[in-house]
Amino acid sequence: MALEVEFAVKKDVLIIRLNGELDHHTAEQLRTQAEQKIAESEIKHLLFNLEGLSFMDSSGLGVMLGRYKQISQWGGRMMVCAISPSIHRLFELSGMFKIIQLAETEDEALDALGVA
């Protein structure tokens, strides 16, 4: 299954909605697209909505970690929301929740990032 990526900007937050599978076949595509959107938009924070994500491997974690480093060097925050139990476990085991905040819904995450 391929990966569908949807981008949206609300104030200074780039929202990246993922649908499908984020693995070594699709990770490079996401990394390139996300870097481009971050460069062309005046954003401070990142929000990954993983509601439609059915699978993720370590390549996907690497892309997310890279975006975290990119956004945090400018003092921004990164959050994930709407995460499935299997992907939640992957984040837990990898220690990603030590640096990336989790929200139940996109609205909750946007509120936490200061976008009403």
Image: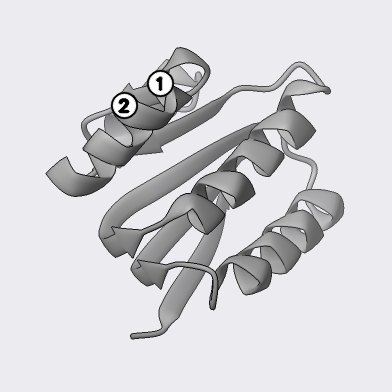
Above or below for 83 versus 91 = below
Q: How is the image coloured?
A: one colour
Q: Which residue corresponds to mark 2?
A: 92
Around disc 1, counting alpha carbons within 10 Å, would you say few (fewer than 14), some (14 to 19), or many (20 or more)? some
Answer yes or no: is residue 10 visible.
no
Around disc 2, counting alpha carbons within 10 Å, would you say few (fewer than 14), some (14 to 19), or many (20 or more)? few
User: Who's the residue at 62% across and 37% down the image?
Assistant: 65
Above or below for 17 versus 21 = above
**Residue 97 numbered tag:** 1
Above or below for 26 versus 44 = below
**Foreground residue, 66 or 104?**
66
Mark nearer the N terminus (2 vs 1) = 2
Three-letter code, disc 2:
Glu
Position of residue 78 measured from the top left corner of the image (x, y, whole percent): 55, 29
Q: The N terminus is located in which quarter?
A: bottom left
The answer for how far apart the CA atoms under marks 2 and 1 are is 6 Å
User: Who's the residue at 46% across and 14% down the image?
Assistant: 98
**Foreground residue, 99 or 92?**
92
Above or below for 40 versus 12 = below
**Foreground residue, 37 or 85?**
85
**Residue 8 numbered tag:** none
Position of residue 36 measured from the top left corner of the image (x, y, whole percent): 80, 62
Outermost residue toward the bottom in this view: 1
User: Who's the residue at 50% across and 19% down the image?
Assistant: 114
| Badge count | 2
Position of residue 82 measured from the top left corner of the image (x, y, whole percent): 24, 43
Corner quadrant of residue 21: bottom left
